[in-house]
Image: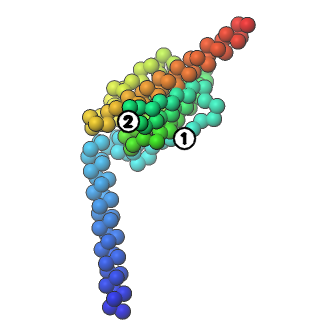
Amino acid sequence: MLEEKKQASADQELDSFVEELQQQILEETRQVYGDTAYERWLNPVYNGTIDSPDGYGCVTGPCGDTMKIYLKFKDDCVKEASFMTDGCGSSNICGSFAAEMAIGKTPDELSDITQNAILEKLGGMPEEDEHCALLAADTIQDALNDYRVKQTSRQEKKEL
Ligand code: FES
């Protein structure tokens, strides 16, 4: 009986230690990344694929992480956007913001989604993670390029 009580108390201590540790990690992450990026890290919206995208970008950064961006256009404006990445938490945050920023943009406006524009939108990142925003920006530009190539070939087919 005594042994069982001891075990239960040890389990409880371990649980509260783990919970405290988790809270500490979350708080440290919030402090390092700031509120905006932290909230997005917890809830990386726009994550996923889009069937038959009008623009598809896939870029592997020098760190080895790959990002994919899917764009769906209507009337030459982005109607839907999403991202996928096998990268770090920061690349998930940046991909999510890049997809969000793409929605409603014309092709010309998509060119304005640069590394700096993403960093500004999410309120900055630690210097060592800034390259994750570059990966997201490069992937958006790759998807834009794909859209333009497809548009040009559609145009050429019409003219034949
Ligand atoms: Fe590779 Fe973040 S470390 S994209």
Image quadrant assignment for residue 54: top right
Q: Mark number for residue 118?
A: none
User: Is 29 placed above or below 110 here?
Assistant: below
Task: Look at mark 2 in the image and give the residue it sits on.
Answer: 63
What's the distance in space between the residues labelled 1 and 2, CA to CA? Answer: 22 Å
The x, y position of residue 101, in whole percent, is 45, 29
* Residue 100 seen anywhere in this rendered image of the structure: no
The x, y position of residue 94, in whole percent, is 40, 35
Work out whether mark 1 precedes mark 2 in sequence or the reverse, and give the earlier one: 1
The x, y position of residue 102, in whole percent, is 48, 28
Q: In front: 26, or 135?
A: 135
Q: Residues within 10 Å of mark 2 (few under 14, many from 20)?
A: few
**Residue that appears at 71% across and 7% down:** 159
Q: In front: 60, or 4?
A: 60
The x, y position of residue 104, in whole percent, is 51, 26
Residue mark closest to the camera, 1 vs 2: 2
Label 2 C-beta lies within 8 Å of the nearest ligand 1 atom: yes
Q: Mark number for residue 48?
A: 1
